Image: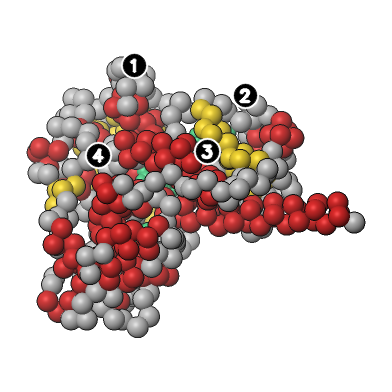
Amino acid sequence: MGDVKGFLKHTRAKKQYAAPTERVEHFEEFVLPWPKEEYKDQAARCMDCGIPFCHQGCPLGNKIPDFNDAVYQGDWKGAFDILKSTNNFPEFTGRICPAPCEASCVLGLNNQAVNIEHIEREIIETAFDEGWEKPHPVVPKTNKKVAVIGSGPAGLAVADELIKKGHEVVVYERDAQLGGLLRYGIPDFKLAKSVVERRVDLMKASGVVFKTGIHVGTDITGGTLAAEYDSVVLCTGSTIPRDMQIEGRDLKGVEFAMPFLSHQNQKNGKEIDVIQPRFNAEGKHVVVIGGGDTGADCVGTSNRQKAASVLQIELLDKPATARSTENPWPEWPMVLNTSSSHEEGVDREWSMLTKRFIGEAGQLKAIEMVEIEWIDKGQFKFKEREGSSKILPCDLALLAIGFSHTDPSGLVEEMKLALDSRGNLQTTNFKTSHPKFYAAGDSRRGQSLVVWAIAEGRKAAKVVHDQLMAEAVSITVVADL
Ligand SMILES: Cc1cc2nc3c(=O)[nH]c(=O)nc-3n(C[C@H](O)[C@H](O)[C@H](O)COP(=O)(O)OP(=O)(O)OC[C@H]3O[C@@H](n4cnc5c(N)ncnc54)[C@H](O)[C@@H]3O)c2cc1C
Ligand code: SF4
């Protein structure tokens, strides 16, 4: 819990960033570390609150007061051991987690929450610097084979947990490089790909085998995997994007956010030499449709590509700057979020409906929007505000309105895996409708967060391990009879 009176002595420190004008010139990370002493002061703000709601706030159940106390005591190795006991990849969450733990921090009731995420990042980076983070020790082999499909955070967490138990683990990934959305979705300026590679290298050294460029369901069938492996875990993500079927949708220049973002990441990673003109914002008037985090990533990327202008629009009303009485602590605060990408330059408009895309010779040239008034948000009912329609120049419209569900074709179709009412893989305790197949992460849960994907991967791995060991025991008992 740090210093008992720490929260009275220290205020919450702001994260330090390189200046916006400087950081938009490159795609590197730009968060600057604090001096080591500042982390100690920030950890000291964690109070003796009795019931640490942050435990529930964090999907991994990170033992936050314990690692804060260790940091306050200067025991960074102890803090690392505590953090790693619940989180396989703190270097990811310490950079890009929206920190639901901080939203539920008890200090946040009448003060500013403890800086949990930033402390987490420093703990794991210290561990890497000091050489404490090593491949897992070799354990006796179980002679059980598990295939993991997908190398996003869920698949990586499943593999990392199962290799520790002595199983043979092979991860199949259809993309050329590993990491799922960590690599191809989340921009490099939020998460450097060297951080993903550092973790993958450790996992390889622990014995995990990665096979890239293999699309399960196309290059290898689910039936083959079912025959070769004792268990198969699907961590295939929620990949079907939400679309908008309005006039002009088929014009060149109306693009989904994901290919736009992944092209830039591929260019940074030297997988491609040039970004295709349709995914290049340089000199263009960009309108990002969707006010969420993916939209913010499009804003940051457009600015780095030197767009002529960037506008982000959102259908919902502008959120308030502070919690309302209907949204009390420790709920996730539905308040205005100004991200580092917004600070780099963007116009933002809320309560705005896209009416149509306007083009010339098949190319997007303008966008028509209209202001709306919400009648019933629960029923998704709104009306257009009379006389508020406007047409703005637009050469690139990026659809960042989320993902609806996992891909129902290919492997899912072949293995006849049941889907739930939202189109995600239907599971009971992470088991799908096929006895050998399990699922974790966005493919099961729907579009979510990296911290949830890791948490799901850990839980699914435990279910798989328990099942494999139960089968091993029953085979031994039968053999003994
Ligand atoms: C642009 C963007 C930015 C985001 N930013 C954040 C953020 O800042 N913080 C945060 O917490 N969350 C963020 N998220 C959400 C987060 O990235 C996801 O919730 C998380 O990555 C889900 O992990 P996953 O392992 O379930 O799936 P994914 O990361 O989607 O990985 C699925 C993997 O499965 C592979 N795959 C699929 N089908 C097959 C197949 N048949 N054969 C072989 N391989 C297959 C895919 O190629 C992919 O690599 C963001 C999402 C997007 C789109
Ligand atoms: S993983 Fe996310 S929610 Fe959990 S302690 Fe870290 S920042 Fe908080």
Left or right of residue 416, residue 351 in this image: left
Q: Find disc 2 in the rendering and name its residue.
A: 219
Which residue is found at the position 26% from the left and 46% from the top? 129
Q: In which quadrant of the rendered view does residue 66 lie? A: bottom left
CA–CA distance in space, label 3 to label 4:
28 Å
* CB at disc 2 and ligand 1 closer than 8 Å: no
Whether the residues at callouts 4 and 2 have beta carbons within 8 Å, the answer is: no
- Of labels 3 and 4, earlier in sequence is 4
Residue position marked by numbered label 1 in the rendering: 361
Q: Amino acid at mark 4?
A: Phe
What separation in Å lies between label 3 and label 2 (alpha carbons)?
21 Å
Quadrant of the frame with the N terminus: bottom left
Q: Looking at the picture, how far across and down is residue 45, in whole percent?
A: 21, 73
Q: Position of residue 154 (x, y in %)?
A: 50, 47
- Distance from disc 2 to disc 1, alpha carbons, whole Å, reads 39 Å
> Does the rendering let one see residue 234?
yes
Q: Which residue in the protein does label 4 denote? A: 189
Q: Which residue is mark 3?
A: 208
Dot 1 amino acid type: Ala
Q: Secondary structure at mark 1?
A: loop
438 on left or right of 242: right
View quadrant of ligand 2: bottom left
Disc nearest the viewer among 3 and 4? 3
Q: Mark 3: which secondary structure?
A: loop
